[in-house]
Image (cartoon, helix red, strand yellow):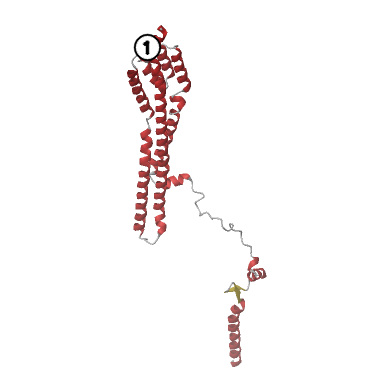
Amino acid sequence: MAVDQKRFAAALAVGVILCTAAPAQAQRTRVWAGAEATTPATESSEEIRLAANPAAVSVPPGPPAGLPVNPPGIASESLLSTVVGGGILMIPLIGCSLALAVFGIERAVSLRTGRVVPRMFVDRFIEQLQDGEFSRQQAIAACDSSGSPVARVFAAVVRRWGRPAVEIEQAAIDACEREIMHLRRYRRIFNGVATIAPLLGLLGTVFGLIRSFNDVAAAGAMGRPDMLAGGFGEALITTAMGLLVAIPAMVLHSFFTSRVDRLALRLDETCQQVIDEIAVETVGEGRRRAAA
């Protein structure tokens, strides 16, 4: 019995030793890149070779050095998402931009020199007056058939045919003022858009900043600047949109104002030529020459 107990104790001791030594043999220390790591005993020889030679590991190619890397989401961001990110004030700003485009095209078409002071009509009309081919009624009919602004001014002048030059000039001034006021219509729209658009952009900036600070205060995260990004983005978008609308509006306002001034000068010059042909002083002088 004593012999059996000794054998059992010896076998138990051998089993304990084997169980303790197995994990130690199954793991071995590997040194790579200055750090210690354990490699399982089941690791293949190929993995051991790659670990021993890091240069053999294939690394996917990255972007060339020196080139900027686009942040995720920037390249795929569309114009619609930018407009939506600007908030509710983007709606009146878009309305201002549409009004600017519509009235800008209309003024560009209406203020063409060939439409306001058609050169062919003016030259032919003055030439026929100088040659005596026109009577008063014929000149008025020719002006009515043209329908251009300069023709309407000529019609007002011709109706004073044979009157003193001062009276005809006054009629010409009144007719020119009416036509110039007609040419200057819609000018206040450009001035209004140039004034309102930056104010709307500034209001959107204030709304965006208020929303950002309210979000941070509600979340209780004063140390998280990422929560300010949404409101700051809305503020910057509305400010940029307001400037993008206001700057072209100011340019168009100045351009069309100068165009009207040049057309007014052209109307005055052509009217003076007509006045010189139909004034009583000119008609009387022609009659005296014919009688002599």
Q: Nearer the viewer, residue 264 or 59?
A: 264
Tell me the residue that label 1 is attached to: 284
- Whether residue 286 is visible, yes or no, is yes
Q: Residue at x 45, y 20 (%)?
A: 122
Q: Position of residue 70 (x, y in %)?
A: 52, 54
Query: Is disc 1 placed on a helix, strand or loop?
Result: helix
Q: Is residue 273 left or right of residue 40?
A: left
**In percent of the image, x 34 and y 23: which residue is there?**
173
The amino acid type found where label 1 is placed reads Gly
Count how many numbered circles sit on residues in the image. Answer: 1
Q: From the top left corner, tell me how far across and down residue 283 is, in percent.
A: 38, 12
Could you say where residue 43 lies in the image, as x and y percent from the top left?
A: 63, 71
Question: Farthest residue in the front direction?
Answer: 292
- Which corner quadrant of the image does residue 171 belong to? top left
Furthest residue toward bottom:
2
Q: Quadrant of the C terminus?
A: top left
Who is closer to the viewer here, 183 or 26? 183
Q: Is 156 located above or below residue 249 in the figure?
A: above
Q: Nearer the viewer, residue 283 or 60?
A: 283
Residue 231 is situated, as x and y percent measured from the top left of the image, at 39, 52
Q: Is residue 98 above or below residue 206?
A: above
For residue 86, say whether it is visible: no
